[in-house]
Amino acid sequence: MPLSLPHAFVKRHAWIALTGLALGPQAVADEPTQVVASFSVLADMVRNVGGDRVEVTSLVGPDSDPHVYSPRPTDARALAEADLVVLNGLQFEGWMTRLLDASGYQGKTVVATDGVPLLAYGGQSLHRQDEEGDEHDHKEHDHEEHDGHDHDSHEEHGGHGDHDSHEDHEDHDGHDDHDSHDHGEYDPHAWLDLSAGLIYVANIRDGLIAVDPDNSEHYASRADSYMEDIQAAHDQVLALLDDLPEHAQVIVGHDAFGHFSRAYGIDFLSPVGLSTEAEPSAADIARMVDVIRERQIPALFVENMSSPALMEQLSEETGVPIAGSLYNGALSEEGMTSHYLGMILHNAEVLHQGLVDAEGHDHDDSHDHHDSHDDHDHDH
């Protein structure tokens, strides 16, 4: 089923273009509010809320990776001239604090994730699932050995999900730096859950009103309309993914999709952690190959910000096709994925097509992966 942006979203963007042409110089008689956003997803949100009352600079542009971004001198100048700065927070932009200090910016800063339900990051997904599997097997064994009297021990040693697994992650420093690359204890990619996107937009609206109160009604009205579009897109994603197997598993390049997983019920596995800076070890890749075979993972997905080399290697070794490209931390220059809502809807469509098409894919013959690879070369 082809996806389309919500009708109100498309209609409003067409209206903006037409009125901008019709009004001419009078429309820009007042200086627009200067907003600097840390990366392209936030910049698109600001433009949707601000309309012609804002001029937005995105420090990290389309198709560029915020994880590995190196600020330029022009960025400090843009911040120095800004009326408002919008960043994600949750240690997503590790370079942003230094840049703000260097620029001397003293104005208002919006942290877009303020108020978003936090998602504890319990460690790189491949290691975490292995540990959870070992723990599950151990508990089942204890249950059989002790006739089910291991509940108190489980409570004592932390069986409460993310919180306790995070404490474990902090205590064991062996993987902390490699997996999180200083991204902190929470997954920062909250915008991938459209219900969190509603909170982002509310924070941006409030920030714009604070620095430009004369146009508060303009910002409030546009934010309301944009939130309706986001809610419609959220419902569309839920409907699209509703017919997929519960907790369907796919492989991606890095652990960016935790919020999407929590919202929409697809499990993502990756051989590296939260940051695209991380590189998988040979042991991680070998373990991932085993996981793909053991669990009959139906599809692999590349990411627009990452090299496809890892997924191509995994596809070659397992015969599992690369089903498409997903977007997470950067919009594209043009097309559907050049907007926040289009990006999320694109991801849902690609996941749906990849998983539905994979239903007939036979992984039972796990010893004959070269033949399977030959059968699926056209999907690469």
Image (cartoon, rainbow, N blue to C red):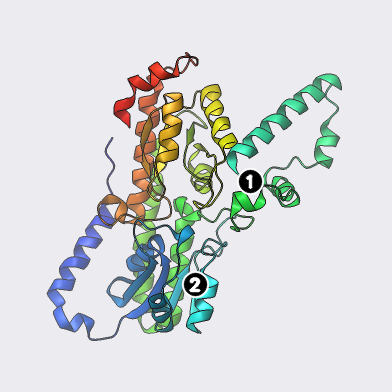
Q: Is residue 58 left or right of residue 17?
A: right
Determine if residue 361 is in view.
no
Residue 354, quarter of picture: top left
Tell me residue 144's x, y (percent). Answer: 81, 19
Q: Please rate how many residues cluster around mark 2, counting C-alpha atoms within 10 Å: few if below 14, some from 14 to 19, many from 20.
A: many
189, 323: nearer the viewer? 323
Q: Which amino acid does label 2 sit on?
A: Val
Q: Earlier in the sequence, mark 1 or mark 2?
A: 2
Tell me residue 49's x, y (percent). Answer: 36, 68
Real-space CA distance between mark 1 and mark 2, rounded to the nearest whole angstrom:
28 Å
Q: In which quarter of the image is the N terminus?
A: top left
SS category of the residue bearing label 1 = loop
Q: Which amino acid does label 1 sit on?
A: Gly
Q: In this view, does 136 lie to the left or right of 375?
A: right
Give the answer, above or below, for where 84 lies relative to 29: above
Q: Name the residue under label 2.
A: 110
